[in-house]
């Protein structure tokens, strides 16, 4: 039985690493490299243009890391093989149900095993991002930036610049630096990735950066609002008031 044709994208910020993988792939004629990307922005664009079956994906890259690339990819049926020089990401990769994890420098035999796995797993769905970022049994790794795909544009928002976040159906409206942008994600799932000592869910529809809170005002019995430094007013629920009080006390 012939091996299935696999259209692949190679993503790595190091040219030598991309060349090394390309040379190794010459022994696998069923793997057709349709694009080579030196950063995460190029990778997201290449996936949209080429609809690959497989991504060989580095993890530590400038601007967008490998996990952020996966978050921005709209298709959910691409096989992912992480290729990195850092073994501390292995648990995250396997918990994310990635097909395989190659630790650089890998051998041709190790690459062949990964491609064999890919052949058996073409079409498997990508995991939710909270699985990627919070391995079972490990300490949570909080976001230090939020990436948003807005049409063909990708916005990278440092977490320190976020003022507050509002729920809008299946989207969140992120307010930062006098701007706002919609991201297709629920407020609950985003909240799981935020540092609870810095970002407090003060209402079922809002999260606030406590550094932006100027004061809390009582409107009526058990009814509070948060006044932010830019004069924005946000409602606070009873449970939200308890959470806010616990963090700032």
Image: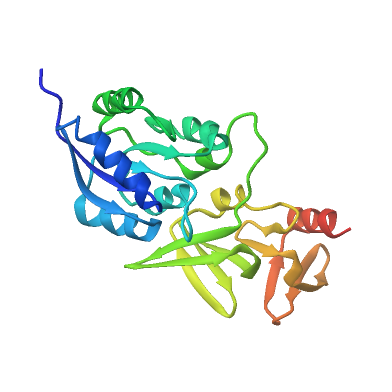
Scheme of colours in the image: rainbow
The answer to which quarter of the image holds residue 247 is: bottom right
Q: Quadrant of the N terminus?
A: top left
Tell which residue pokes out farthest to the left in this image.
1
Does the rendering let one see residue 77? no
Residue 80 x %, y %: 35, 38
**Could you tell me which quadrant the C terminus lies in?**
bottom right
Residue at 36% x, 27% y: name it. 107
Is 204 on the left or on the right of 224, as rendered? left
Residue in front for this viewpoint, 111 or 174 = 111
> In which quarter of the view is residue 177 placed?
bottom right
Q: Is residue 66 left or right of residue 191?
A: left
| Nearer the observer, 207 or 161 | 161
Give the farthest residue toward the top: 1
Q: Residue at x 62, y 62 (%)?
A: 206
Residue 58 in the image: state x and y as whole percent. Answer: 42, 45
Where does the image place residue 233, in percent across and percent down from the top left?
69, 76
Residue 63 against residue 153 in the figure, above or below: above
The image quadrant of residue 108 is top left
User: Can residue 9 be spotted in the picture?
Assistant: yes
Instruction: Indicate whether 124 appears above or below 40.
Output: above
Number of labels in the image equals: 0
Where is residue 158 shown, x and y percent of the image? 58, 65
User: What residue is at 78 percent from the left and 66 percent from the top?
Assistant: 223
In the image, 95: left or right of 8?
A: right
- Nearest the viewer among 176 and 58 is 58
Question: Residue furthest toward the right?
Answer: 249
């Amino acid at each position: 039985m012939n091996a299935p044709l696999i259209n692949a994208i190679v993503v790595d910020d190091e040219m030598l690493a991309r060349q090394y993988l390309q040379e190794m792939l010459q022994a696998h004629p069923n793997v057709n490299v349709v694009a080579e990307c030196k950063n995460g922005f190029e990778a997201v664009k290449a996936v949209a243009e080429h609809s690959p079956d497989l991504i060989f994906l580095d993890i530590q890259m400038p601007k967008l890391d490998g996990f952020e690339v996966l978050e921005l990819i709209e298709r959910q049926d691409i096989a992912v093989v992480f290729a990195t020089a850092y073994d501390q990401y292995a648990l995250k990769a396997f918990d994310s149900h990635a097909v395989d994890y190659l630790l650089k420098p890998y051998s041709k035999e190790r690459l062949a095993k990964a491609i064999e796995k890919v052949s058996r797993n073409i079409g498997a769905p990508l995991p939710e991002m909270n699985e990627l970022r919070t391995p079972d049994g490990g300490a949570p790794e909080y976001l230090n930036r939020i990436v948003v795909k807005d049409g063909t544009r990708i916005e990278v928002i440092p977490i320190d610049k976020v003022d507050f976040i509002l729920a809008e159906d299946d989207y969140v409206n992120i307010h930062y630096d006098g701007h706002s942008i919609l991201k297709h994600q629920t407020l609950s799932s985003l909240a799981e990735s935020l540092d609870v000592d810095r970002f407090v869910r003060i209402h079922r529809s809002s999260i606030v950066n406590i550094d932006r809170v100027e004061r809390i005002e009582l409107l009526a019995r058990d009814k509070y609002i948060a006044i932010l430094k830019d004069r924005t007013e946000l409602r606070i629920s009873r449970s939200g008031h308890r959470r806010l009080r616990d963090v700032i006390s």
